[in-house]
Each structure stands twice: as C-alpha cells, then as structure tokens.
Amino acid sequence: MPPGQYVTADFPVLSAGPTPRIPPDEWRLTVIGRDGVEQSWSWDRFRSLPSEELTVDIHCVTKWSKLDTMWEGVSLDVLLADFDTSAGFAYIECYGGYTTNVPLPDLTGGRAWVAFGYGGAPLAPEHGGPARLLVPHLYLWKSAKWVSAIRLVDRDRPGFWESYGYHIYGDPWREQRYSGD
Amino acid sequence: MAGAALLGRLSWQVAEVVEIIPETPTVRSIGFEVPGWPGHRPGQHVDIRLTAEDGYQAQRSYSIANPAEDRRVVLTVESIPDGEVSPFLVGELRVGDRLELRGPIGGYFVWEPGNGGPLQLVAGGSGVVPLMAMTRANAAAPGPIPTRLLFSARTFDDLIYHAELEALAGGSLEVSYALTRSRPPDWQGYDRRVDFEILERSTWPPRDRPRIFVCGPTGFVETVADTLVAIGHPPGRVKTERFGPTGGPS
C-alpha cells in the first residue's frame, strides 16, 4: 500500500460538479496530435477496438485505496497507434469541463486505458461512464472521468485539480498529494 | 485563483486542541491552535495525521468549520462506526492534546462574501460543515450576501449547528430543514428526502443565478445536483463535494 492510504471496500465518488450524462450517440473520443492532426471515435467505433480486462489497485488522494478492482478498457497504446508519441505530455479534456495533465510516457507501454466497464458491467455515470481514463499507477484524479479528448502537447500545464494546489504528477508511492510534496 | 498552488509546500504542523464543543450525539467540533497558520478560505479542508506508538500512521481529510481566524482552525467531525480516525477525534481527543495537521487544501469548493451571490447552500448531514464556514463568514461580513441553506439530516438531533443557525436565520439568511427518518411532534420543516419539489420551493430559482454549493453523502449529492440541473441551473454553477461512508472529506 502507498504511504498514508487505507483500504476501503466502498467505491467513493469525488467529483467537483454534477455528473454529466452523455448519450452514446453523442459521445466522441478525440485524440489530437502535436501537429494538430485529429482522430475521433464514435461510441460504436470505440467499442469495436480491441479491449483488455485488467485487475488493478486504485489510490485516491483523499486517502482511500481500493484493491483488485476489475476494469475493461481500450489501451492508450491502441488509441495512440497512429500518433507521434514523442510529445512530452498529454492534456486530458472531459465532458463537464474537467481537465488533467499526465506525462505521455505514463500513458503508453500498457500503463493506461480508456475504461468503459467496471466489475463486469458498464461503467456507471458517477464513476465516469460511459468512459474514463484509467491510469492506476497515479492518484485517481489523473484517471479523468467522462474523458472526451487527449491532447498531445510539448509543454506541461496544470489541469483542474493541479491548478488548485494538487501535485503536478501525483505518484501515490511518493505521496505526491499536493504541490511541493 | 490558483489557491494553494501559490503557497508552495504544505508542511505538517503540530496543532494543539484548545476547545471541544459537543454538537450532536456523534459529532463534535474541535478547535485547534496552529502556530504559523497561513489562514484559509471557507470551504477548504485540512489533512489530519495520527501516529500510533508503534509508528503506524493514519491520515484523513476534514472540512474546516470556522471562517478565517488568526491561527485557529475548527473542525467538526462525525464519528464513523468502525472508522480508524474519527472515533478517536470524537471520543478520545482532549483539550491540550496535540496532533499533526496540514493545509489549507482545496480552492474550488470555496466561497467568500467577495465572490457575490445570491448564495445557495445544500447540505446533507455532516456535509453542512464547509457550508457553515461560508455561512459564518457571510454573517460576519459588513454587507452579507443573501443566502439560502437547505439542510437535510436523519433526525432533529442530527442537525449540527441547529441553535446557531436559528440565531443567524432571518435577515440575509434563510434556512430550511428536511428530516428524513423521524421528526419531533411539532416539526414545521420538510419530512422527507430532498426532492424536486423541495428544491424548487426552498432554493433560489435559476433566474437569480445563484452560486450553488452542495455537500453531503454521495447519493444525496448525486440526487441534489442532478435535480438542480433539471430545474435549470447551469452545471458549472453547481459545485459539489461528496463523501462516502468511509471515503472522502467529511
């Protein structure tokens, strides 16, 4: 267990506003390359991509951790296959206006997914459904709910919680909760 | 405003308990003196760290209940059954005890009188704590902002700060209550869970463009936030803070 965390059997919900409801026929996921080239998936096209089932521990900055959570999602390696991934960072945008930032190397190499299933069922809206980013090796605020766009950029810039004093990177094993940790 | 990002590193500080106020059978307020406290804004929280004799440490987040005061931080804590930290804070901590604290944390779920209004607060149970910091700051302001507070709890005894809210009500503050489990015989407030009709009758309508803060257990906040959006409030005006039985700020 990372330092300062405790195990919970619940799946608490922490969101800054109302839960967005995105009908599948209006849902799109877009990746924007550093050269401005975009690739966009409708729900049906996204769901026809190869997906993986994975079992991971998740760690929330508010101190709870949940062990052996079971997800289904599309690896970022699949979504980024046609992109130049030499950009240093990804800026993540979401339905509802949430944003976060993650170094691009943390999203590749089988370390990150866009998840659409949880516990064998469709991902519930309050947990980020229809689809959320899942980067289990970072604090869970980086696993942005209701993800709509992944922007590959050369310069890092803080997202939503990072602008309010949360750590720019957020490694639970180094207890990087707040700016300066 | 970028809040704590501007303050640099948040260090652990030793805080001494200087005041304990019983609030309900399961809730009490604990006043800490924190040397060098940088001040805080209503809605922010702190992290508490307890260390056992064998070195085991446990951390939790708690909302701050008082408006900014010199070196003083008041937390209102509900004892969670089987909790690791809150039963100690509510049942065992005494005046003169010391523990470690760091903060203030958070800058989104924050309101100060200078931010304007009208202000709409919706609280479920101990979710009233950060909203009370806003209410108290507003009451102390030279020109208080018109504010409505809708406060839901299980029973009358679970209404944290009831006497103080009754004393503050009138003038710029309107308070409505909903009791979901049992009511006193002469109860004048709502007698059920907060729903569309209660929100429509007791909160600012969308045409008044209120700033809205909702805090409480996850299910409560989900319902209230969804209903406020259904009534016509822009989602971006509805700021939420949720906590589960064992997770999140409480």
Image (cartoon, coloured by chain):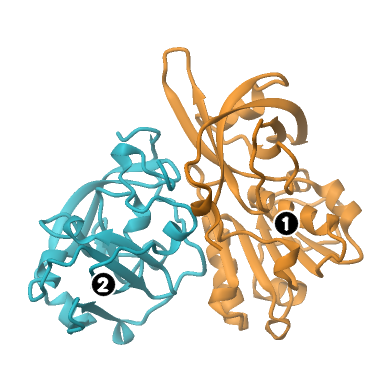
Chain colours: A cyan, B orange
Q: Chain of mark 1?
A: B
Percent position of residue A83, x then y: 11, 74
**Residue B186 seen in render:** no
Q: Secondary structure at mark 2?
A: strand
Residue depicted at 60% across the width and 67% down the height: B224
Residue B134 image label: 1
Percent position of residue B52, x then y: 48, 17
Query: B246 left or right of B188?
Result: left
Q: Chain of mark 2?
A: A
Residue closest to the eye, A31 or A68: A31
The amino acid marked with disc number 2 is Ile
Q: Residue furthest top?
A: B53
Assess disc 1: are there few (<14), some (14-19) or many (≥20) residues with their C-alpha within 10 Å of its C-alpha: many
Residue A150 image label: 2
Query: B143 left or right of B71?
Result: right
Percent position of residue A149, x then y: 29, 75
The answer to which image quadrant residue A1 occupies is top left
Q: Secondary structure at mark 1?
A: helix
The answer to which image quadrant residue B114 occupies is bottom right
- Image quarter where the C terminus of chain B lies is top right
- Image quarter where the N terminus of chain B lies is bottom right
Residue depicted at 39% across the width and 64% down the height: A159
With respect to residue A87, does B40 lie above or below? above
CB contact under 8 Å: marks 2 and 1: no
Assess disc 2: are there few (<14), some (14-19) or many (≥20) residues with their C-alpha within 10 Å of its C-alpha: many
The amino acid marked with disc number 1 is Met
Query: B141 left or right of B98?
Result: right
Residue depicted at 51% across the width and 25% down the height: B50
Percent position of residue B29, x then y: 72, 36
With respect to residue B79, does B181 lie above or below? below
For marks 2 and 1, give the CA distance: 36 Å
